Amino acid sequence: MTDSVPAATAPPTSSTVRPSDRFVAYVHQVCASPQARAALRRGLGLPVQQCTYLHRYLVPWLRDHDDPHQGDVRRAHYAVASLIAARPRSARDTAPGPHTPMAWYERPNLGAALGQAVDQGVMKENSAESTLHLMARQSSDAIHPYLPALTRQLLAGGIPVDWAVLLEDLAWFNRSRDRIATRWLESYFRTATRSTDAATSDDSTEETTR
C-alpha cells in the first residue's frame, strides 16, 4: 500500500515569505496523512543517514527548494519535520499562522519559548536555564537529541514553537553558534523574568503606599 504525499498548497507569491515557512507549511500538510506522520516521526533525534523512511517525503522538497548537499541544512530539515510529526495530540490542530510582516529576529526563538515555559510554570527556571547554557556550548549534532523531549514538554504545556525559526537556527548553528546562542539567551531572560519584574513592581508599589 502506498501513501501519496498531499499536494502542497501554493504559497503566497510574496518574496518576503521565507523558505523555512514554506517548508513548515508543507510538513504540516504531509502530516495530515497518519502514515506519513508516522514515517516522519521515526526520524526523531537521528542523523539523516538513519532516516530511511523520511527520504520519500523530504528529498523532493529539498531538491526543489533548498541546498540538499549542505549537511547541517539537511539535518535541520529532517529534524524539524520529525518534531512536527511527533507533536502531542493536543498540539496537532495548530497549523502555521498566516505570514505577518514581523521581522525575523522579532519572532520567538527557542530561548523565548523556554522563557515563556518558565513564566507559565511549565518548566522550572533552573532546568530551562541550564538547558540553554548547555546547548550554547555544543554543536548542533549534540543539540538534536535534546529536542524531541524538550519540544514535547513545551507543546504539552501549551507553549508554541516557531518551527521555521528553529529550522533556520539549527541550519546555521555550527557556523554562527555564538550569535544564535546569544539570541536564545537574551530572548529567554527577556521572557522568563516577566513575572519576577511584575512581582518586584507590585512589592515596590505596596512599600510606597504604606
Image: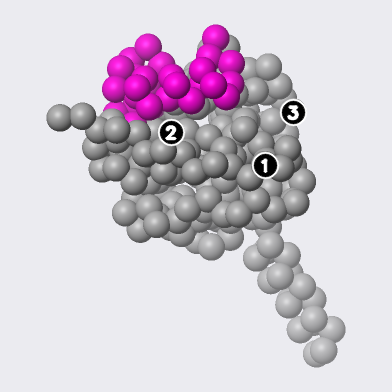
Q: For residue 13, which numbered disc appears in the image?
A: 1
Instruction: Locate the C terminus and report the quarter of the image it occupies.
Output: bottom right
Crowd tier of the residue under label 1, counting other residues whose Cα lies within 10 Å: few below 14, some 14–19, many 20 or above: few
Extreme residue in the left direction: 1
Tell me whether the residue at label 2 lies in contact with that at label 3, contact meaning CB atoms closer than 8 angstroms: no
Instruction: Locate the N terminus and report the quarter of the image it occupies.
Output: top left
Three-letter code for the amino acid on which mark 2 is drawn: Ala
Looking at the image, which is closer to me, 61 or 7? 7
Looking at the rendered image, the disc whose residue lies closer to the viewer, 1 or 2, is 1
Image position of 89 with respect to 210: above or below = above
Q: Which residue is mark 2?
A: 81
Looking at the rendered image, the disc whose residue lies closer to the viewer, 1 or 3, is 1
Dividing the picture into quadrants, the one containing residue 183 is top right
The structure residue drawn at horizontal position 68% and vertical position 62%, both measured from the top left corner, is: 194
The structure residue drawn at horizontal position 37% and vertical position 12%, both measured from the top left corner, is: 49
The part of the chain drawn in magenta is: 40-69
